[in-house]
Amino acid sequence: MKLNYYNIRLLLGLLLFLMILLLTGCWSSKEIEDLGLIVGTALDIENDGGSWEEQDGEYSNRDLITITNQFVTSETIGTGAKEGSTQQKAYKNVSETGDAILPTLRNMILKIDKRAFAEHSKVLVIGEDLASTVNMQQLLDFFLRELEIRPSSTILIAKNRASDTLESKETVEIPAFQLVEIIKGYERTTKILPPMTFAKLDGKLHSGSSFLLQNVVSEKGEVKFAGAAVIEGKTKKLIGVLNNKELEGITWITGKGKGGLVKSLDEETDQPIIYEVLSMKSKIIPHVDGDNISFDVNIESEGRIAEHWVLSEKPFNNEFLKRAEKVSEKEVEQLVKNTLDKIQKEYQVDVSGFGNRLRIEYPKVWKKVKKDWDQTFSEVPIKCKVKLTIKDYGTSGY
Amino acid sequence: MLISSNDKITTSQALVILVNYILATGILTLPRTSVEQVKTPDVWISVFLGGLIAMIVGVIIVKLSQQFPEKTFYQYSQDIVGKWMGRVLSLLIIVYFFTISAFEVRTMAEVTGLFLLEGTPTWAIIMPFMWVGLYLIIGGVNPIARLFEIIFPITIVIFLIVTFMSLGIFEIDNVRPVLGLGMLPVLKGIKTATLAFLGPEIMLLIVAFMKKPDKAVKVVLVGLSIPLIFYVITVVMVIGALSIDGVVMKTWPTLELMRSFEIPGLIFERFESFLLVIWIMQIFATFTITFYAASLGLAQLFKKNIHPFMYGLLPIIYIIAMIPKNINDLFKFGDMIGNIALFLFGVLPLMLLLISKLKGRKV
């Protein structure tokens, strides 16, 4: 085809026609002003439910779940940032009750004017009561399946009502973001677990092993992280909680902590010595002898004296350092022992990675004991050795 | 149709064609399909062995093609097993090529429909894709090779960057122990792993286009090593982050990996769209090269001009692409293609090579 006058005109005509298609722009775009960004979600069980379902003309005797979504919209952000008009909060919580997740979420359409958009959802808080009655796999199916919810968001367990953790006295704060920021503190304390995201949770649920979720408490409009919730692998339900001390023990056993403190009392003067963890390593060594399984836990850590109230001694003196090491070691040993007692005797679940070590070191043995591991674990002897090394004592030698 | 002397490709072009053909749908699903078979973290060993097997097959194919310089499989198969048998074999391979092409198109439509263009009808995703592909292959093998040369470095750079960003959620314990339950689980995964390396069969045709056909063995070895490295990295990173039990739960595990982490502070926090971009480019590459291989086959079989066959195949590919009713059908369709390929390229080239050696070379 030669490019003569007529051909060029024809081509240009075709081009014009094609350009009409482009004029529509992004025809399925959603304006950000019209979106209600979900930044956090809370799930609670409803004990006196029933009445809400009647609105839909159906009654169900299944457990009713209240979903609270925390929305951030253009309006809430706009007023929250302005000085003076601090009456309105930076977020808006909307609740709805139902017996499955998605239908309940869709019922929210009936009461909000924005299109809910969950791509930026950061955190899911589940109430303790709900987690102990409903199988987590069933409860979270929607969240693991839905494309709009990212596998990078984190799961927490709330001590009382989960929806309370998404409330704040401060008008400028967005509670969901606050929660996420607090989680990041796990690098500086042994009392917060590394974040459990949906991505990790899916594997845990499917493998059938027990695990821990970070617990959060809401008191008088303030949220606070406190201990961890124990989820049993078999039932996939919450069976109990560990307090802060026990959670510290878990962190020492797994060696996953990146920092933290050990407070111990000097034996002679009864004054506190604070050991700050600079590095932490833990080796769980499984031993298999016939049908007998046992574990050694070797914990090693390096750190410094960050504070001490013992007036009569000074860290310039090596003997005092040795003494401080000893008491701190004892303290850690005590933490670990308490924790092991609790999870082995009381809850009878392995939440600190012993099974995982056995799987790696003795895969064939693991294959046999895998099914009833939590049961087996509760009777396994565990020996613990702690070695702390104090490397320095900051800028003060006294 | 003879190959004109100016439609030849260099050794490096042959290499990128091979690599771009191999890298396709597999990279998104391989971690799941192989873990389903192996069930231990040793999947990467299976992938490694699968790659080695594919290399052996590739070398056999190249040796076969090198016996008949300047001729593609469609032409020389008739020299080996006679006119009719050769035609039947060629036809089988042609069908295989355009079926693969349809499969790639449909997988692309499913993934983009799910992750990028929610609500866009499947035909609206497929059609522009196919038209652009048609436009490319009308130019012949040289434009294809040149486009692939552009795609190739982009793929490597983005893939490596994005994958290593997931190191933050990598847990070494998830990929241990190595060979904990012995070699048996590893062997179970070899078939699945080998099928991820579908692609050396293109050497049945490409050798004829090469300026230096004697370098073809090198092309196969290097061309399979690159996807091999890609696959091993992918499998290790995905299992390391999601664990064996998590991987089997995911429809598209590799994309799930990219969605599982965010890196605040960079210009982008989320990286799955990057992976999708290079993945769609790779699908396009596989689609065009198989589409071209099928049309070339028909043209050489009927000794006619290639262009009408290209236009003619377009609706056929579209119809085949629309056959699977849902995503499970699509995965089954993929398995079926794999099984056919196993026979077609695992057994056949070796037999043909033996026959042609026994008969002695005809000039």
Image (spheres, helix red, strand yellow):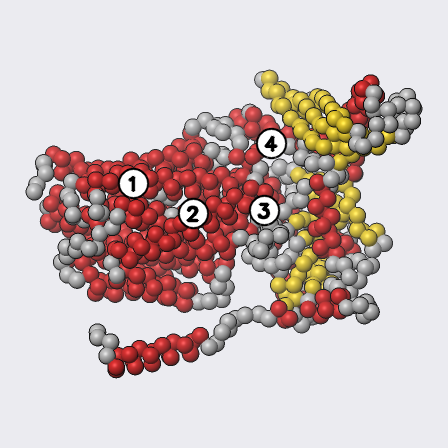
Disc 3 element? helix
Whether B218 is drawn above or below A167: the answer is above
Instruction: Name the residue rendered at 30%, 61% in the picture.
Output: B136
Q: Quadrant of residue A67?
A: bottom right
Q: Which of marks 3 and 4 is nearer the N terminus?
A: 3
Per the model, the C-alpha gap separating discs 4 and 1 is 41 Å
Front label number (4 vs 1):
1
Q: Residue B322, relative to residue A267: is it above or below?
A: below
Q: What residue type is labelled 3?
A: Ala
Circle 1: element type: helix
Do badges 4 and 2 share one subunit? no
Q: Of discs 3 and 1, which sits in the foreground?
A: 1
Between B211 and A295, the one lying in front of the other is: B211
| Kind of residue at disc 2 | Ile
Check disc 4 and give the amino acid type: Asn
Mark number, residue B220? 1
Question: Which residue is label 4 attached to?
Answer: A356
Question: Gap between marks 3 and 1, in whole Å?
Answer: 37 Å
Q: In front: mark 4 or mark 2?
A: 2
Looking at the image, which residue sits at the far left? Answer: B363
Give the chain letter at badge 3: A
**What secondary structure is marked by label 4?**
helix
Query: Would residue A110 be seen by someone viewing this image from the given angle?
Result: no
- Mark 3 and mark 2: Cα distance apart in space: 26 Å
Marks 3/1 in contact by CB < 8 Å: the verdict is no
| Residues tagged by mark 3 and mark 2 found on one chain of the structure | no
Using the numbered discs, state the Cα–Cα distance from disc 1 to disc 2 in whole angstroms. 18 Å
Residue under label 2, please give it. B156
